[in-house]
């Protein structure tokens, strides 16, 4: 699966020379101004005895000391914490079978206790880890009705919950790739590693800017983003998934303002909807080689006459790179853009 190689060895990259001229230094103010919808009112990012206060999903979080027992609720959040250099403070990792950690940091997680493999940890398992900070991609991981620890239950046990900006309930449909930069900055402040956070966010901005520069003179190709489950076909028209397409240089054939995406970023569709839009490329998420091949077979069989199939522009990206609050969003932008405009990256 050549389109997946970036996820197995992801590591911070040196700043591309072509991208540096237009970039500003990363700051909480700059990131908030980018339309993320989350503010960071940081009283101080200095020593561990000073208070850091941020707003996350409409909740005010205040940290008088640096969290010492942290749980990453998905590999994407565990990766982010590891890249911020706080592996010694990780008291647990969860949903570990949903995606592998990138190869360059996987060994750092070898001794971190696994609280769950394919679903969020049960309430008692999470509380038994005695966390003081739990970092999650969405608010779903705190659904008490599913047997998970709620945010209130965590608070009663001395823990605070940080949800990825793009995973907040009121942000999910309008999330953007750059929301992860807010998460990097906020977590850098909370964990008192602002320099590491600034470097990580700058690298992400540089990579996005490099893509933008490379494809600036290329006419946009039309892209449909779909998911396939058996013989059911769905379209993705909004949220961070759609913004990934946009930043990769694609023109989404589905309108995020359409009624079918008003309440949720995805909707079930009939195959005729794809045929009528005649996309140049189709993007889909995949969780395994078998699923990828099944999806490719379905698309080739169902849409043999559209340009995406005729020109073999069926672009698979790891499903984990489409989650909110993951550096994999940057990987997805690069992967898709390189397939859409290969001449731009030679």
Image: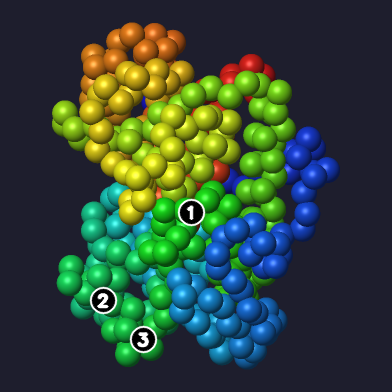
Residue depicted at 28% across the width and 41% down the height: 267
- Which residue has dot 1 on it? 175
On the image, the x and y values in percent for residue 38 come to 55, 68
Left or right for 138, reference 144: right
Mark 1 neighbour class, 10 Å CA radius: few under 14, some 14 to 19, many 20 or more = many
Q: Residue sitting at 49 percent across and 63 percent down?
A: 165
Q: Which residue is mark 3?
A: 155
Distance between the alpha carbons at the discs numbered 3 and 2 = 10 Å
Quadrant of the rendered structure where residue 224 is? top left
Q: Is 145 drawn above or below residue 343 in the view shown?
A: below
Q: What is the secondary structure assignment of the residue under circle 2?
A: loop
Between 87 and 53, the one nearer to me in the picture: 53
Q: Is residue 305 visible?
A: yes
**Mark drawn on residue 149:** 2
Q: Is residue 79 above or below residue 288?
A: below
Mark 1 residue element: loop
């Amino acid at each position: 699966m050549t389109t997946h190689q970036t996820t197995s060895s992801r590591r911070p990259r040196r700043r591309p020379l072509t991208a540096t001229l237009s970039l500003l230094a990363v700051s909480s103010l700059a990131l908030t101004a980018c339309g993320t919808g989350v503010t960071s009112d940081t009283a101080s990012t200095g020593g561990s005895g000073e208070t850091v206060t941020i707003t996350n999903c409409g909740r005010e979080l205040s940290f008088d000391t640096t969290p010492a027992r942290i749980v990453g609720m998905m590999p994407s959040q565990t990766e982010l914490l590891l890249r911020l250099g706080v592996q010694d403070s990780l008291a647990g990792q969860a949903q570990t079978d949903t995606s592998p950690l990138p190869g360059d940091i996987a060994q750092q997680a070898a001794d971190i206790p696994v609280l769950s493999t394919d679903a969020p940890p049960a309430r008692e398992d999470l509380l038994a880890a005695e966390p003081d900070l739990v970092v999650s991609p969405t608010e779903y991981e705190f659904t008490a009705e599913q047997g998970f620890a709620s945010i209130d239950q965590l608070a009663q046990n001395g823990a605070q919950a940080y949800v990825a900006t793009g995973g907040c309930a009121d942000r999910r449909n309008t999330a953007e790739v750059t929301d992860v930069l807010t998460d990097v900055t906020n977590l850098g402040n909370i964990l008192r590693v602002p320099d590491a956070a600034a470097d990580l966010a700058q690298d992400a901005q540089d990579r996005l800017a490099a893509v933008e520069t490379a494809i600036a003179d290329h006419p946009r190709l039309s892209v449909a983003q779909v998911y396939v489950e058996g013989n059911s076909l769905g379209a993705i028209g909004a949220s961070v998934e759609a913004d990934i397409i946009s930043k990769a240089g694609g023109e989404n054939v589905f309108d995020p303002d359409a009624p079918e995406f008003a309440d949720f970023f995805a909707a079930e569709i009939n195959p005729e909807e794809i045929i009528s839009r005649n996309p140049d490329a189709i993007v889909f998420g995949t969780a395994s080689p078998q699923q990828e091949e099944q999806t490719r077979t379905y698309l080739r069989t169902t849409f043999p006459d559209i340009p995406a199939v005729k020109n073999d522009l069926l672009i698979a990206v790891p499903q984990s790179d489409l989650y909110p609050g993951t550096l994999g969003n940057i990987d997805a932008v690069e992967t898709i853009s390189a397939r859409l405009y290969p001449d731009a990256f030679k």
